[in-house]
Amino acid sequence: YKARRSSSLQSLARRMADQVRKTRQPVVLEPMPAHERRIIHLALRDDPDVYTESTGEDEARKVQILPK
């Protein structure tokens, strides 16, 4: 389960990064646990066009994908 979830989160991160590249608008993902947010951050950390930030409080923390 964890491996499948990890790969689906990585593909979600790439799809959303492509959307940010096209629209130049930030995308906010749904709230998720810390280990899932980390997968998104790591998937996009070397991307030259976008960067990620976590926003929100406690259970409602979300990942934002923003254009550079």
Image (cartoon, grey):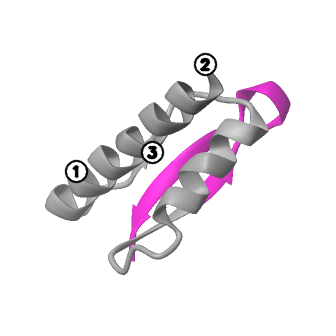
Q: Residue furthest right?
A: 58
**CA gap, disc 2 and disc 1:** 27 Å
- What residue did someone put label 3 on? 10
- What residue did someone put label 2 on? 1
- What residue did someone put label 1 on? 19
Q: Residue furthest top?
A: 1
Q: Nearer the viewer, mark 2 or mark 1?
A: 2
**Residue drawn at point x = 22 percent, y = 63 percent:** 21
Q: Secondary structure at mark 2?
A: loop
**CA gap, disc 1 and disc 3:** 14 Å
**CA gap, disc 3 and disc 2:** 14 Å
Q: Amino acid at mark 1?
A: Gln
Q: Amino acid at mark 3?
A: Gln
| Quadrant location, the N terminus | top right
**Residue drawn at point x = 45 percent, y = 55 percent:** 65
Looking at the image, is mark 3 or mark 2 earlier in the sequence? 2
Looking at the image, is mark 2 or mark 1 earlier in the sequence? 2
